[in-house]
């Protein structure tokens, strides 16, 4: 039985059978954002800085902390003491950081279009070729790569959960909030874009993970004041007036999802 991200799916009745889901965020413990190389690193001069006892993103970088987090593709739960972060030499160069193009001609005719760049570990939402939203991502690790290709969102579930992986140290199924299904493989296993932990490197079991600090606060108590909610922002952008429904939904008019590149 496959253990990739997602579940087998019986579309006719919307019944989900437990098959697989999300790998825990600590599957690559030796990695740190400074050890990961992205193509856009060459465009922003930076130094590597390790967080010391008593330090956090907010304490070190003040109102620039969100930009530093985006630049490192990391969340506050994983920006802990001892973690080495990329720190730009000029902070203005990473304001509202995104490595994705502001205009993307292949999406010019699409009202809604999602681009996932595996090499950059970033996701972008486009409207008629114009970038309207972008977010750092955690895609599949080397042993369970996120598939590249041209897909489409076909299902959504606001309160999805893993059927294999749990919150570490508990038997609570790992939450996959604001989940958008974009691919089903030949074994009937589904792949989703959803909220999860972002440790600063590819760490999922095939899905595309976005910030969900509300989930982290609920289950880990960190951060104390949730702010980053990219998974929810994307979900609402895709689902519109249907975004608050709790049940699994089929999506017949979902945006294209183009996944390109190769994860670092």
Image (cartoon, grey):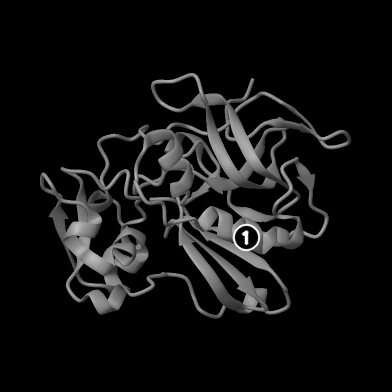
Residue at the far right: name it: 12
Q: Quadrant of residue 91?
A: bottom left
Q: Between residue 135 and residue 264, name the one nearer to us.
A: 135
Seen in the picture, residue 21 relative to 61 is either above or below; the reply is: above
Q: Residue at x 54, y 40 (%)?
A: 206
Task: Work out which quarter of the rendered image holds the N terminus and state it.
Answer: top right
- Secondary-structure class at tag 1: strand
Q: Position of residue 224 (x, y in %)?
A: 34, 46
Q: Position of residue 262 (x, y in %)?
A: 46, 53
Q: Position of residue 111 (x, y in %)?
A: 72, 73
Look at mark 1 in the image and give the residue it sits on.
Answer: 258
Q: Position of residue 36 (x, y in %)?
A: 29, 52
Q: Residue at x 51, y 26 (%)?
A: 165
Judge left or right: residue 220 versus residue 79: right
Judge left or right: residue 256 versus residue 126: right
Seen in the picture, residue 107 relative to 29 is either above or below; the reply is: below
């Amino acid at each position: 039985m496959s253990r990739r991200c997602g579940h087998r799916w019986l579309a006719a009745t919307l019944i989900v059978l437990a098959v697989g889901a999300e790998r825990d965020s600590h599957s690559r413990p030796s990695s740190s954002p400074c050890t990961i190389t992205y193509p856009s690193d060459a465009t922003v001069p930076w130094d590597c800085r390790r967080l010391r006892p008593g330090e956090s993103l907010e304490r070190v970088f003040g109102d620039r902390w969100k930009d530093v987090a985006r630049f490192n593709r990391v969340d506050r739960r994983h920006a802990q003491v001892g973690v080495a972060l990329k720190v730009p030499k000029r902070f203005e160069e990473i304001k509202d950081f995104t490595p994705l193009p502001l205009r993307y001609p292949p999406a010019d005719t699409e009202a809604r279009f999602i681009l996932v760049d595996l090499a950059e570990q970033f996701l972008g939402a486009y409207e008629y070729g114009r970038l309207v939203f972008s977010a750092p991502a955690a895609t599949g690790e080397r042993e369970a790569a996120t598939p590249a290709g041209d897909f489409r969102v076909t299902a959504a579930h606001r309160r999805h959960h893993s059927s294999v992986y749990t919150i570490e140290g508990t038997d609570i199924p790992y939450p996959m909030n604001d989940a958008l299904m974009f691919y089903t493989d030949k074994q009937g296993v589904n792949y989703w874009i959803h909220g999860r932990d972002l440790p600063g490197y590819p760490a999922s079991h095939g899905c595309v993970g976005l910030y969900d600090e509300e989930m982290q606060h609920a289950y880990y108590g960190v951060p104390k004041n949730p702010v980053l909610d990219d998974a929810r922002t994307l979900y609402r952008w895709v689902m519109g007036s249907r975004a608050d429904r709790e049940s699994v939904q089929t999506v017949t008019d979902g945006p294209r999802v183009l996944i390109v590149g190769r994860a670092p």
